[in-house]
Image (cartoon, rainbow, N blue to C red):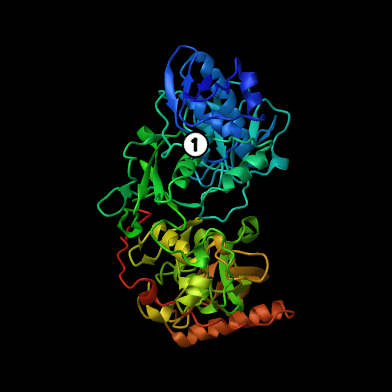
Amino acid sequence: RRCTPSSLRPVNVGADDGAAAADLATGLVTGYSGAVCRSPSGCTVRCVLPSVAVAASMALFLCAASWRSSRASANADQLMRSFIAAAYTRHAGVSCWPLHGAETLEHQEEGSIGLVPLNVCRSACEAEPACEGFVAAPGQDVSHCWLRRRIDLPRCRHHTVWDTFLRTSIDAPAGFLGAGTERLPPWDRPAKRLHFGAEADVLAAQVAPSRQALLVDLKRLPSFFKLQGYDCTGPGASEPLRGHNAPLLSAAVDFCRLACAQVPQCDGFIFGHKVNSGRCWLRQRVDLPRCRPPVGRKLAQWDFYFRASPSGGSPSSASSPSGESKSAGVVHEFYMYRATAEGMLSRYPLGEVNAANVDGVLWYLMNEIVTNYSNGTRCPRRFGISEIHRLKVRTRATAALHAAGMNFGPRFAYDQGKCEGRCFPGNLCTGEGDCADVYNRYGFVVGCNNFADHYPFPVDNTSAPHGVWYSLPIGGKCQQEPTGEKDCSWSIEDAGVVTLTELELTSMGKDNCCDGHCTDFWRDQWNPDMMQRRVSAMISLFGEKYPEWPADIRAPVCDFDRHRLYPVDSWQRRDPWR
């Protein structure tokens, strides 16, 4: 309720009721490092706050986490709702459910996750990358909570007793931790000391007058790569930050970011889940290849947040926080191709995906979509794939990659928007730590691999020796011509689409039958000459359908050199789908 610095005049940052506490979230408050927070019951907790300007609602959030009384809990709930308002847009009276403007998460059955406080519902949503928001009852201590994806508000039911909370979109590169997008564990945890490293004399807690101002304030913090489920506590993986062996009782990831930002030697932090929910440990001397990637997709005990441009190195201009240095690399313009289910490309922004040249996409279709890996016809087609999109892409190497003598980086495998690293036979992948390390050192670069190099996959000779696969990290996507800055290495333009049926009907026959027609288009899969015929047929089909576009634009050489980027490849390989 009151924070009284031992050597300074007392200042009131509390309130006698929840409404007044909520008002403070939009007023001007000055707090002090080393302050003592006293609850109405007389319990005393020392608050050590970081020496940076933050939103007043966040400073109050910290104090509220130290209170321990029924009166304080009411105030804390008001402040928690204020914090949620900064990261979510509330749509009062709107209810979204399947067939009415939203879908459930893929791995969850329709139904409430239970009667939970609002912040627990928020935490559950933010633990799921696909969750776009949640539906809950307003003005109640606990409520049923439904997690939702693919929310289309106009199609939802309006004038109901429920509210829909839509996650706020933040203009930050994917792969980095954005402000206000992490979990808030329950408020009713024991009051303990909050320690944020070196103490400062004064914390100037300047107020964010609106949701956007709060998000902008948080964006000033360093960026972090979130490595879900990574264990960086093993020998050589990282060390506790000196003087920070005990965990911080932070209650939110943003405060851990804040804490790590105060210490130049801090390379990242561990954020706990389950029994360690709301705790974080600051770490230094991080060696990502020595960290243990997760096995499977279950929620792990913790995540690791790797600080971009870590201490102990001299980051290149491409990976500097400012990212202002442009590259001397050449802009390359060519076609890429991506096979999708109907309508999927327009439904989601293109990025965090893989694409291919003509040879590469046809080999993928032939081996994984229309056949059971050469063992008979697959019908219906795998993943519902029915379209092949042509994309005119412009790429430019970042300054760091250009200095290394390459136009392309490693081709990482993306699965449902998650970077799995380099994937080898047997579904053995190096994990998203590999992605974070490369993107941190070289910027968000376009990756590629030649089939003829047999690395990382496919490793055997194929009927498409000229095949190339690409990876497109959304963190490098730009709207204009690529500059080669760390966050602007590629741009894209839609250049037409053909259906799988249109392609197959260019060669009628009886070898492969599906969807009411038969085709010989995929016949003789292992014959390179037949593959070249397929390549020519697809280029001609696009040319006939879109005469205003060049039928083909030759791609540059995929010049990724694994020996330069991985002179010693110490990354562990695990099956993320096991």
Crowd rating for badge 1 (residues with CA inside 10 Å; few <14, some 14–19, many 20+)? many
Label 1: element kind = helix
Query: In the image, 6: left or right of 497?
Result: left
The number of callouts visible is 1
Q: Position of residue 279 (x, y in %)?
A: 39, 36
Look at mark 1 in the image and give the residue it sits on.
124
Residue 521's place in the image compared with 126, above or below, is: below
- Does residue 453 show up? yes
Q: Nearer the viewer, residue 180 or 421?
A: 180
- Snapshot quadrant of residue 313: bottom left
Q: Residue at x 32, y 62 (%)?
A: 571
- Snapshot quadrant of residue 484: bottom right
Q: Nearer the viewer, residue 372 or 147?
A: 147
Q: Amino acid at mark 1?
A: Ala
Q: Residue at x 51, y 51 (%)?
A: 222
Residue 343's place in the image compared with 112, above or below, is: below
Residue 192's place in the image compared with 261, above or below, is: above
Q: Position of residue 132 (x, y in %)?
A: 59, 43
View extreme (left): residue: 235
Q: Position of residue 474 (x, y in %)?
A: 56, 60
